[in-house]
Amino acid sequence: MLSSFRRLAGLRRETILRRPPTLFIVPSPRLYSLQPPATMAPDAPADAAAAAAAAPAPDPATAKKNDKKEKAKADKAAKFAAKQAKLKEQQAQQSAATAAAAAAPKAPKAQTPSLPPYQDPTPAGEKKKIQPFDHPHFQAYNPSAVEAAWYQWWEKSGFFKPQPPRTPETGRFVIPLPPPNVTGALHCGHALANSLQDTLIRWHRMRGFSTLWVPGCDHAGISTQSVVEKMLWKKQKKTRLELGREEFTKLVWEWKGEYHERINKAQRLMGGSMDWSREAFTMDENLTAATMETFCRLHDEGYIYRSSRLVNWCTHLQTALSSLEVENKEITGRTMLDVPGYDRKVEFGVLTYFKYPIDGSEETITVATTRPETMLGDSGIAVSPGDARYTHLVGKFARHPFTNRLLPIVQDDYVDPEFGTGAVKLTPAHDFNDYKLGERHNLEFINILNEDGTLNENAGPFQGQKRFHARYTVVEELTKLGLFVKKEPNAMVIPLCEKTKDVIEPYMTPQWWVRMGEMAEAALKVVEEGKVKISPESARKSYDRWLSNINDWCISRQLWWGHRIPAYRVVFEGEEGRETDKSQWVVGRTPEEAQAKADAKFAGKKFRLEQDPDCLDTWFSSGLWPMAILGWPNTENADFKQFFPTSMLETGWDILFFWVARMIMLSLKLTGEVPFTEVYCHSLIRDSEGRKMSKSLGNVIDPLDIISGIELEALHAKLLTGNLKEDEVERATKYQKTAFPGGIPECGADAMRFTLLSYTTGGGDINFDIKVMHAYRRFCNKVWQASKYILGKFGQDFVPPEQINTAALSVPERWILHRMNAAVKGVNEALEARQFSTATKVAYQFFYDELCDVFIENSKGLLSDGTPEEQASVQETLWWCLDTALRLLHPFLPFITEELWQRVPHHVGTRPETIMLAPYPEPDGRLEFPTEAADYELGLQCAGGLRSLAADYNIRADGKAFIKVSTPAALEKVSAQLQAIKTLSGKGVAELSLLGPDADEASTPKGCAVYVVSADVAVLLQVSTQIKDIDAEIKKINGKLQKTNVAIQKQQELMGREGFEKASDVVVTAEKKKLADALAAKENYERTLAEFSKLKL
């Protein structure tokens, strides 16, 4: 047994402390030396003086002798003083010389030359030429060298394409990639999504599933048009209107070509194993055909209709927006804000009170509004039923002071009599709440705005003014008429355009709408029946809530970039002019189809067709994504028949309604099938301060900058290439200096992927920190160095084992294979449950803490001192562990595992061409050795406990230690490992004794610090020589014990709260561990206090 443990003596303390499970957490009571008190009493000097006084006087000879002694002492003292003075002079001179040397210019330190960029010799698309480990770029882990060439070979070899399932029962696994917007570079949110999806794709592929991951991009109508318009103005000082629709559209296609390629390059560098032969774009031929088919079919079935209703209107872009494209800004009171198109800031957060005259009387009614300019479109006033102040006015009219319009006074339960004056002005054409009241009370809908935000003819004398200029002029005119009352601060929410930061206006305009009620019911039903599983549970609840309160969907956008709506207004001869409520429309998949429909419907009449200039909402076409990328509407397409419905959609929870729910609704309506059977919603990534990622804040991180690294100055320079304003650039630059003072170090794609996966708990948002990313690069280096060590131990004649001979295994070998088997089981279960953080944690702990820090260290002694049979066995065990570990890690770390696995020896003809087609590890019952593993763990825990105590009390040598066991079974296990445990405990432990269950009180050591290993085993280390004041030390430990008891109580209260059991497994496990650690610390404190108390008896 000792030979099995020998090399573990070199284990670092931090390694043992890090190993799971956390068994080596020790209270930090400094248990201090238990020295006996000093022998001299405090009054000893006085007693000595008295004794001297009582002594007889010396004789002359003795006195002369004493004088000589005194003289010699004086001479000696003088010499010493002279020597000290000379020494001080030398020190002063030396200090001056040192100061002069410091002031002199220093020669630059010789720096280790950095390696030039790696130049891979592999021809493009060919299998990578493996370089030896002594190559400068491969001596240590170098991400750019390791990740070179593999992707091109994977793609060219067709490994990403779906293969027949390994067995008929295995089946298929299909993911439609949520298409990134073709507006520029990817961000860390995309990297997270890609890492999650590729992990699942690679995992299923290795398990023998027929896997397909379809890539693509979204044309992102409003986002792309907005970016290109800004670029056009910045470069040419032109608007799209000046350029014209055709030329502007050409410009956007050029933009799309450039950035589409950039996005795809990033996808490849991140290692995404997508089938590029099936790449899709929402405006390519097939998806355009699918979009036209959907619009026409839904229109013909009565689901799509045209109506003039309120929409979110951006006056800057002059288009309707979806709610997703609107940001709500909360303000607490009067606030001045910048608004596009205005030279001065505009006032918000103020409640303006003014009076309306009651028609036919001298009476007035006072109302209040945060948007005084909208009073120009008022068509009524509402009061609360039963409000005594206004009962007599209900049914009467107020007269508008500027338009002479009569405003009926109505009563409605919607009105809060406690807010403002209790009387509410109604502007049905410019307020979503007023719109409903306007319909309920049959009020007039008066639009006062033009599309650009200026006031139209309905605004009377204010026509032509900008809306926020009118905010001031209306108040001025009310003041002149004596109708202005007062202003007061008012908290409010301001809707802003996400792209332009323009203030959104509720605006009435004719648009195309989709009737959603019936489709929403069907989408709710399939989730309720389990045909679509949505996780986490919070996302499922949001889905139910949104669809249960759904409104009809406005699908038209006043854009030039996108799918132009296949609807044609029929303009009859003599009816030229703008659209009216009576205008006739026809739809057609092509202009020819629309013409044929119109000819049949309006036979004998003269007309021409005018296509709607608007485009469809981007979410309309992307809502068809899972089926359109597989060939729909051609249901006979081979891909559609084989791969639809897809298996899973992985996306952010923030677009669960805007995209996911619409895909489910449209798929059910158009195909009768769900589009996918599972929806996994990942968390949103925020910066290290918890803020939302925003280009204007400078906290948006390009994944390629993480992969390759980037200097701070280059990060600053990238801010200048976009459309940020000067103040935004300044703010972003300031953040970058704080967050990335040294730039971003090169981490590689593998480290980035592993970090993002480790963050993913299925819970709240992720606060991203680049320091964590760089730490996982060090893990990649650990994988590299450990593999390099293991591969170096195989001789030229080494033959990998086909099976492990378990009968010949030593206890350490059984332990590592048992832990490997547990890791394989744990990772598979975690991935099946979509617990990505758990999966990475289990894989990390096995490779780093168990394989590297325990077994590899242990193997060094076995390989150098063991018998030939032992050495051969250890080599085979190391091979088995490395091969399994690399396959286990591959879905997370595709590049480094391929690079290393290609170096691992295998039987000729049995190894797949690539690790991604190798079988994924599965649990093996033959590798379960629970008894031997538990015994081995007990020895490690005892040694770890003693090492921790020795480190805490600074005992570096001659330590006396004890292991106290309370049961015969524990006695047997520990006694068999006693010498090995002593060796593992380090140099600080010189003696180690075993105290059995029958040990009497006299044999129990005094003055020991205690570490509880288990209910049956505790280790003790004698520390009495280190403690100076036992009472003080006991007081300190009691203080720590009290704090621990408080921590235990708080942790128990937390875990006892209602709903705790519903938290994610990761959270529950972490909180349980905190409690277990605190309880263990408490027991250690209590046992140590008991031992220290004995010293006072």
Image (tube, rainbow, N blue to C red):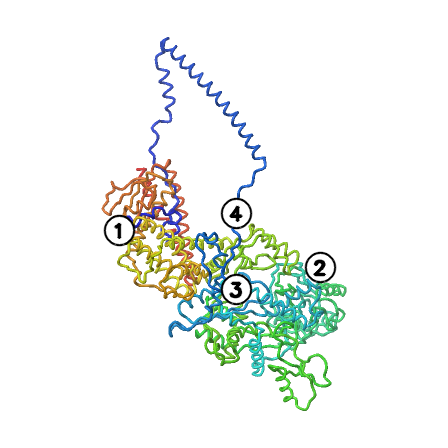
Alpha carbon separation for disc pair 1 and 2: 82 Å
- Residue topped by disc 1: 973
Look at the picture and state if 212 lies above or below 777. Answer: below
Q: Which residue type carries mark 4?
A: Pro
Q: According to the image, label 2 marks what residue?
A: 344
Tell me which amino acid carries mark 1: Lys
Vertical order, 521 against 729 (above or below): below
Q: Which residue is mark 3?
A: 267
Q: At which x and y percent is residue 765?
A: 50, 60
The front one of 108 and 46 is 108
Disc 3: CA contacts within 10 A as few (<14), some (14-19) or many (>=20): many
Q: Of helix, strand and loop, which one carries label 3?
A: helix
User: Which residue position is annotated with label 4?
Assistant: 113
Report the Cα–Cα distance between label 4 and label 1.
54 Å
Q: Earlier in the sequence, mark 2 or mark 4?
A: 4
Between disc 1 and disc 2, whose residue precedes?
2
Three-letter code, disc 2: Arg
- Label 3 close to label 2 by CB (< 8 Å): no
Q: Secondary structure at mark 1?
A: helix
How many marks overall? 4
